[in-house]
Image (cartoon, rainbow, N blue to C red):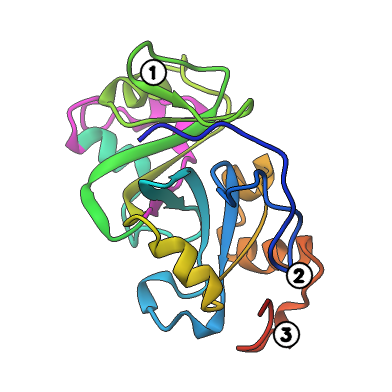
Amino acid sequence: MAPTGKRTGESTRRAGPALPNSAGYLDGRLLIAMPVMGDERFERSVIYLCAHSAEGAMGIIVNHPAGSIDFPELLEQLGIVKKGEHIKLPENAESMKVLRGGPVDTGRGFVLHSSDFYIENATLRIDDGVCLTATVDILRAIANGSGPKHAILALGYAGWAPGQLETEIQSNGWLHCDADADLIFGDDVDEKYGRALRKIGIDPGMLSNEAGHA
């Protein structure tokens, strides 16, 4: 699904900056789960929206670690590096976090990364600073030190049918804020939820089920 074009428009919600276009599409922005969400898979989640249009939406959760899986171990399982060769990995590969990107297609890896890396016919450019690549070639590039400066690997993604995300937003399920590199790629995964809320002027400790209702 390709991201939609940007058009200037006004927000239909009081909380959060203006929507990026008159149709209300939020691709390239961050969704912030509200307590009223009621779905434990998305509890306290921050989601970078890779695509949003009349056809639906797709995003990557950027603040839910994928359990005990680490990136060097995953590279070994995929045969990209041999057992015991972790010490040869560049620093950004050794420390790269593996996240739980969402409940759809959880056996597949999706790499959100800075736009200094691009694979023809494989990389989706979402905005000027962020791209998405879902092929093993980017993992090889990261392992040998020729990959993007900033990247996170997510297993699975979050997806919405046409109109579903809009309904959830109107039902007070999500807030939204501008994306920035630190919120997407930062190492402090546990702090991203609170920082995203503070970015739009909300104290996480004061958040209630009624906050953000239009």
Quadrant hosting residue 42 = bottom left
Classify residue 145 as left or right of residue 200.
Answer: left
Q: Secondary structure at mark 3?
A: helix
Percent from the top left, x then y, of residue 5?
56, 31
Eye-nearest disc, 3 or 2 = 2
| Sequence-earlier tag: 3 or 2 | 2
The residue identified by callout 3 is 205
Eye-nearest disc, 1 or 2 = 2
Percent from the top left, x then y, of residue 140?
32, 21
Which sits in the foreground, 192 or 209? 209
Is 40 situated above or below 167?
A: below
Which sits in the foreground, 145 or 56? 56
Report the span colored magenta.
77-101
Q: In 3D space, how far apart are the residues under numbered discs 1 and 2 (Cα atoms)?
A: 43 Å
Tell me what residue is drawn at x 48 percent, y 63 percent.
166
- Which quadrant of the figure contains the N terminus? top left
The residue identified by callout 2 is 14
Q: Secondary structure at mark 2?
A: loop
